[in-house]
Each structure stands twice: as C-alpha cells, then as structure tokens.
Image: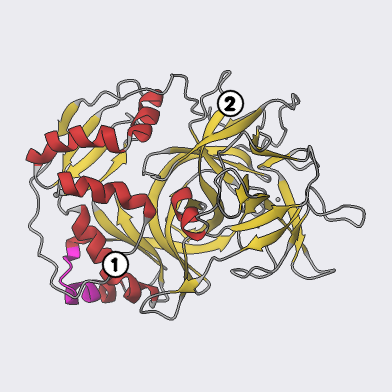
Amino acid sequence: MRTHLIILTLTLGAIACADRTVPTSGPLASRSFTGSAPEPTDYGVEVAFRELARVAPSHGGWYFDTLTGDLTVYLKDMTEGPAAKRALPLMISQKLASARARHPHAGIVFKQGTYTFIELDRWRDALGSLLAATSSVQWWGIDHGKNRIVVGVLSGADSEAIVAMARELAIPAGALRFEMAGRVQAALTLRDSIRPVKGGLILQHEKSPGGTIYECTLGFLALWGDPPWDSGDHAFVTASHCSSQLGATDGTEQYQNRLAPNNSSIGFEVADSSWFPCPDTPNRCSHADVAVYRSTLGPGGWYFRRIARPVSGCFPSCTPPVLTIDPDYRKFWSIVRTDTLISEGDLVSKIGSVTGWTQSYVRYACLDVQREGVTYYCQAYSDFGNADGDSGAPVLEDILGGMDTTVTLGGSYWGTVVGGERDGWGVFSPWSQILKNYPGLKVTLCGAVPC
C-alpha cells in the first residue's frame, strides 16, 4: 500500500508560540523518590529537557503532535507555562521551525502532567540496572508522549515483579507503563555500482574469507580524525554489526555494490568503539550501533554530504519498494544540518538499499534497548518500512521537495522489532548518540573537501 510522502513546502522560519492549553484532569499525587540515586545516565538527546527544567521545574517532557504539529509540553504546575513558552523557542528553534514548515499553524500547547521529567529521569536510571538484568525486558525509557516510563517485556513476563522492584525504590506504580515487546534483531539488501558513492547505497561484506556474503547500507560520508575541524580521513559510516566482529575494530572491508574477484573494496573499518562496561550489570553497553570506515576510493569516487535520492518513496513503506535512483546524477540530497534532539513526533525518512525511501514519525525518542547481551542507550523507534539489508541506512529530516535538496541527518538505522505490539518497527541510533561514540566525526563541513 502506498501513501503519499509528507514533503515540507514552506521555508523554515520562526514558529508562532500560541499559548493554547489542553484541559485535562488535575495532577495525581506522586511520592517523592527516596532510594539511592545513581549517577544520571548521559543521554545527549535529553540535554534540552534538563535545560527547560531549570526554567520550568515541573515540566514532564514534550512531544510533537503528528496531526497538528503542535509541540505539546507536560506541566505539573500550569503556572510555569509562560516561562516555558519564552524559553523553548530559544532552546529548540530548529525543531520548532521544522514543525511549522509542515504545519503552518503549529504552536506550543501545555498539557497537565502527572510526573516531572526530573522524576521520570531519576526513576528510569534507578531501574536501569535491574531491568538490564531481567531477561524478559527488551527495552525501557521515558515515554515523552504519555508522561510515563515505558517497559517493553516479552509475552508471559511477570510485570508485577518489575512493579515490586519499583515499589522498593519508592517509584509510583502509576509511573510505569508496560508493552508486550518483540526482540530487536539486526537488519542485514539503490543496488547498482555508483560513483561517486552516496549514502543509501548497497554494501557487501563477508564475515570470514570465502564465507557468506552479507548486505548492508552505506549510511553517510564523513571526515574522521583529529582536529583541526576541516581535516580528517575520507570515511563513511554504516552499522557496527555490518562487520566481522560486532563491537571490535577488525578491518572489515566493504564493497559497493558487489563483492567479486575483480572488484576492489571501497573502504575498511577503522573505528568500532561501540562497547563499554555497563554500570551495575554484567551487560556491555553502547551508545550506537555504528562503525566508521576509511574510504579507499580515488579522486571522483568520494564526495562529502551526499545521499542517494530515489525517484519516489512512501509513507510508511512501498510495495513493491522503489529502488530506482533519479537518472539525473546531479539529483541527490545534501546533509547540511544534524539533529541532536530527536523528539517524539518528528517526521523522519530512511533511505535503505532494500526498501528504499520510507517515512514515518518518531514514536519513541529515547529507549534503552537490549540485544544479545548489549544494552544500547537512548535509541529511537519509528514505524517506517524496513528490511534486512537496510542496516546502516541514513535517517533524514526536513526533506523540503522542489528545488531544495538540503536535508538534516537524524541518525543511523540498525534494527527491527520482531514480535510484540511494535512488530516491524525500525530502531535507529540518533545523531546525538553516534557523537558519544565518535566525537570527532564530521558530516556537514565543505570547502577543503569535495561536496
């Protein structure tokens, strides 16, 4: 089934801050947290939430309404609305401008909240090590759209045991919401040999010489190395699990489009610092399923910022997928911005070598996800179409249409939920989390490098 993509047609500009309040029932009483508080987990995507808490301490998070474009902000104390309304346009101007481009009448809406963001953040961190050690738990985090902590558990799991854990930490039972979850699986197939290379194209590699050939998607081109800012090796990025050893730098070679005797690789893995010890749990932890490859392409084979542009796409997916790239080689998207604040309700597009250009909204912005003994911090969920072979695909925002070919890089897709209430949803590492693994990665600079 094909549904027309949502293409932004207005120039990005300042958003009107309409002071509209959604009436709801009054706030419920919540017990204060009295357990021992762990060090706050460093989620880059939530920096703005902490900043707003300095101005409006009772705010409980926010999300973008996918129908109206309104930024909907939870407040326990509704009298903090004016202060929040003054602060938000200064803090997240790009996000608000993007919402206004899709919905010209979008504004800022305040909604009665039950819990503050600071409370939810503290409770999530207090539960984190316990949930990571519970095999039936697949992911957890703050559901900014419902002002709760959401926990994804396998069918048949004893959710009451988790409620009991929360009770021992003086976390209100009402602050928890459970979903029946499927397991997150890595997605391992645009398909021609194309030079210069662009994000969204097919990659092939093998786990061992002469072994099975696997397919992934080239995410985006980058500069990788030490300062100064305008230097670094020509590089590209794809998923960490698209290499011989997950979480280890092993020199895996990637081929575009096909691994064959007469073809040369386009690059080899030079950075895969994905894992580190988790606090208070035997799991390994990571901020992103992403690895960096040094390009071995010669002049004319590597140009910065470019993403392949299919002739069409669908919301949420196309059947059959559209993999044809615009025949005019000059037609591609250019990454000129990055989004360090992925939010629920953001409109995102994934460009994968198997399913092409698929699009939907961010449904969860920051969940901790468990997969094969690794906890991935603060991953985002969207129900855009995806399939095996799309792993590593770029996740884009602000596709304007018309003559504007500039886009915002939002992250890198790497996995699919299999089973449960969110079966088929895609999981991607937000740009803010990628930067935590690779702070020296540069994706928007031009001048000293070809673009």
| Residue at 54% across, 56% down | 416
Q: Residues within 10 Å of mark 1 (few under 14, many from 20)?
A: some
Percent across and percent down for residue 257 are 79, 47
At numbered mark 1, what does the secondary structure look like: helix, strand or loop? helix
The residue type indicated by label 1 comes to Asp
**Quadrant of the rendered structure where residue 34 is?**
bottom left
**Is 165 contained in the magenta span?**
yes
* Residue 148 place in picture, x, y as percent: 25, 55
User: Disc 2 to disc 1, how far (Cα)?
Assistant: 40 Å
Q: Earlier in the sequence, mark 2 or mark 1?
A: 1
Most foreground residue, 179 or 378: 378
User: Is label 2 in contact with label 1 (beta carbons under 8 Å)?
Assistant: no
**Label 1 sits on residue:** 125
Q: Does residue 154 appear in this view?
A: yes
The stretch in magenta equals: 163-173
* Image-based side of 12 in relation to 331, left or right: left
SS state under label 2: loop
Q: Is residue 190 left or right of residue 100?
A: right
